[in-house]
Image (cartoon, rainbow, N blue to C red):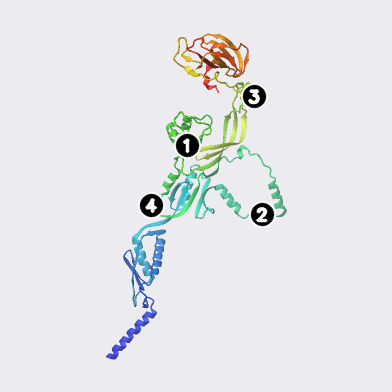
Amino acid sequence: MKKLRFTYIKAAVFSAVVAALFFPTWTKFEKAGDNMFTVLLDGEKIGVVAQVEDADRLLAEARRRLAQKEGGLVLAECNMEFLGEEALFGRIDKEETMIANMAAVLSDHERQTLKQSYTVKINEYTVNVASTEEVLSLLQASVDRYDTGHMYQVSLGQDHTRELNVLTASVDSVEEKISEEKEAEPVLKEAGIHAAISEMFEGVEPAVEKDFEDYDLGLIDMKFGDEVEVVEAYLREDELTPLSEAIEQVTKDQEKNKIYEVVSGDTLSGIAYRNDLTIEKLIAMNETIEDENSTIRIGDELIITVPEPELSVERQEENYYEEDYEAEIVYVDNDDWYTNQTKVLQEPSAGHRRVIALVSYRNNEEVEREIIKEEVVLEAVPKIVERGTKIPPTYIKPITGGRLTSRFGRRSAPTRGASTYHKGIDWATPVGTAVMASAPGKVSKAGWGRGYGYVVYIDHADGRQTRYGHLSKVLVSVGEQVSQGEKIALSGNTGVSTGPHVHFEILINGSQVNPADYLN
């Protein structure tokens, strides 16, 4: 019986030694600290590994398989812990079992699958869509607003100037693309003398002016008016915009700020009206404008709002039309006249013409029109105007100093007999102050005048006349030529007057005008 028991013990020890040496699921005991680790994932037991690094590798593989199954990148938070022990003998779990257990826990704790998607950037605006097909549909919708014949197609290409994987969008002619594909096909080429002759005649083919029927009327070119960038991304489902909503966002007109340069003839109210703005809104948008009476000058830049989509499309069209037109005015210079003197020598009449024009648009706004062919059916008759070339004389204040006491225009009569509408300017000044000719001219009256007292009239070469009233002494005679600034009289208090002063008038075509508008 003892012999049998000893044999049994020997067999058990032998079996243990063989198992330790030949089976990989058991570790050989080494006195070196923890050599077996129980893996816990979010508190759930996964299995046992020999090294911590093994668990990290197996978890990465579990994530990869789960992502492959879901069709995207999986965002699943988890906390992995290890319980280490030092064991003489121990059993570690198979890797496939560990991976399966980890994937199950990850799937239970999966928060969101990150799907492969694309971010479309248009200036500062961005939108996320699910695929390149949706990117193309989105951009094509902007083109189709103006290309009802579907002649142009959007394509995506790699931007080789960028370090990141960025795609750029272009608008291509469908017809040209088909033509390029045909040209790329191999063809039987001429050789020898025949090829040389063909090449020679191609180089000297004369240019023939196109007739109206030769133009491809309608849309001839399209491109995006804004920079478009497309970048691949991995995003959550709730970060993606449905295609129909994205199209509406990109193609719908928005109010955008734009710089407007003031041109000749502009007024604040006119600028506001032409751009569908109220005058109050235009003032609020521009700090340089105080109110509706503020002065604007040619070349000033104002901020206005215009309706524009997020993605603008620029296009060119060849258009045919017939129109009445006016010939340019023909001027005949007269060196004996002043520049403010003109005379119409021939009245105009409109002509009629046929036109091919190259018209450029940004969205629906015409930005340029170039006539590339025209045929005059009826010649226009130009307006012929004779005009002066001499610079008209300037007008100066007729006295030095003085105090302005009465302006041009309506007033309360300062004394009995005086008019309630003042037809000149008055300056109070002591009797005997020198009165000077405001501009060079010829004296047409010098003496006493009813209401004016002593008065001087001077006719000027530009057709205007000046008058100087309430004088104490006249120093010139009728018919005398005087120069600008020459002393012609002394101030006084004669005629209907409230005190010592000079009354000054400027007349154009016999009617008094405000002298303040002409004095330098």
Give the number of the mark in front: 4 or 1. Answer: 1
Residue 309 visible in the picture = yes
The image shows residue 128, relative to residue 437, as above or below, that is below
Residue 516's x, y, as percent? 52, 21
Disc with the residue nearer the chain's start (1 vs 2): 2
Cα gap from disc 4 to disc 3, whole angstroms: 74 Å
The image shows residue 455, relative to residue 338, as above or below, that is above
Residue 273's x, y, as percent? 46, 31
Give the number of the mark in front: 4 or 2. Answer: 4
Cα gap from disc 1 to disc 3, whole angstroms: 41 Å
Which residue is label 1 attached to? Answer: 303
Which residue is label 3 attached to? Answer: 332
Q: Label 3 neighbourhood size at 10 Å, few (<14), some (14-19), many (20+)? A: some
Q: Number of marks in the image?
A: 4
Quarter of the figure that contains the N terminus: bottom left
Instruction: Find residue 238 and name its label.
Output: 4
Which amino acid type corresponds to the residue marked 1 in the rendered image?
A: Ile
Which residue is label 2 attached to? Answer: 189
